[in-house]
């Protein structure tokens, strides 16, 4: 099974990470989208909509943005930088702790 691991910077080194399964057909799409992300600083300024639009208008479609957003960590503050996107092909999983029950 394939997984996508993403790291984003929410606000001056406040890093958020996410590891989730990714559909096979989305892998090639994500790689193409990544080629169009500002390649100097990997800016993804969702916290500044005008700047975001100026960076990606004509480079990424709404569908591209929505697809990538599905795999990025979410933040109420918005994200300003994509630090890492990695795809892992994991053959097996050994759950050590799972199905944790919370006490009240």
Image: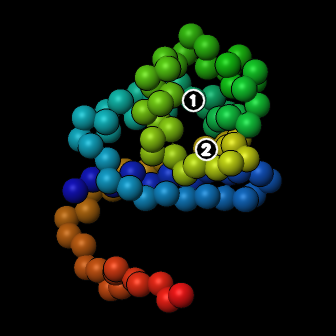
Which sits in the foreground, 56 or 48? Answer: 48
- Figure quadrant of residue 89: bottom left
Residue at 19 percent of width and 65 percent of height: 91
Q: Looking at this rendering, what residue extends furthest in the bottom direction? A: 103
Q: Secondary structure at mark 1?
A: loop
The answer to whether marks 2 and 1 mark residues whose Cβ atoms lie closer than 8 Å is yes
Res 41 seen here: no
| Residue 58 place in picture, x, y as percent | 56, 10
Q: Is residue 96 above or below residue 39?
A: below
Task: Point out which mark residue 103 bears.
Answer: none
Q: Can you identify the residue that label 1 sits on?
A: 37
Q: Is residue 87 left or right of residue 8?
A: left
For the N terminus, give its image quadrant: bottom left
Q: Looking at this rendering, what residue extends furthest in the front direction? A: 104
| Residue 17 place in picture, x, y as percent | 55, 59
Which sits in the foreground, 48 or 8? Answer: 48
Q: Is residue 68 left or right of residue 1?
A: right
Residue at 27 percent of width and 43 percent of height: 23
Q: Can you identify the residue that label 2 sits on?
A: 82
- Figure quadrant of residue 48: top right
Q: Is residue 2 above or below residue 38?
A: below
Residue at 25 percent of width and 35 percent of height: 25
Q: Is residue 90 above or below residue 7?
A: below
Q: Secondary structure at mark 2?
A: strand
- C-alpha gap between disc 2 and disc 1: 9 Å
Residue at 73 percent of width and 47 percent of height: 77
- Mark earlier in primary sequence (2, 1): 1
Within-10-Å neighbours for mark 1: few <14, some 14–19, many 20+: some
| Residue 55 place in picture, x, y as percent | 67, 20
Figure label count: 2
Within-10-Å neighbours for mark 2: few <14, some 14–19, many 20+: many
Res 78 seen here: yes
């Amino acid at each position: 099974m394939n997984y996508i691991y993403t790291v984003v910077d929410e606000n001056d080194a406040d890093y958020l990470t996410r590891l989730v399964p990714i559909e096979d057909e989305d892998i090639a799409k994500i790689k193409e989208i990544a080629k169009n992300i500002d390649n100097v600083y990997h800016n993804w300024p969702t916290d500044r909509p005008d700047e975001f639009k100026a960076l990606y208008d004509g480079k990424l479609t709404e569908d591209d943005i929505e697809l990538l957003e599905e795999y990025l960590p979410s933040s109420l503050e918005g994200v300003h930088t994509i630090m890492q996107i990695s795809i892992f092909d994991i053959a097996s999983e050994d759950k050590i702790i799972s199905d944790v029950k919370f006490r009240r």
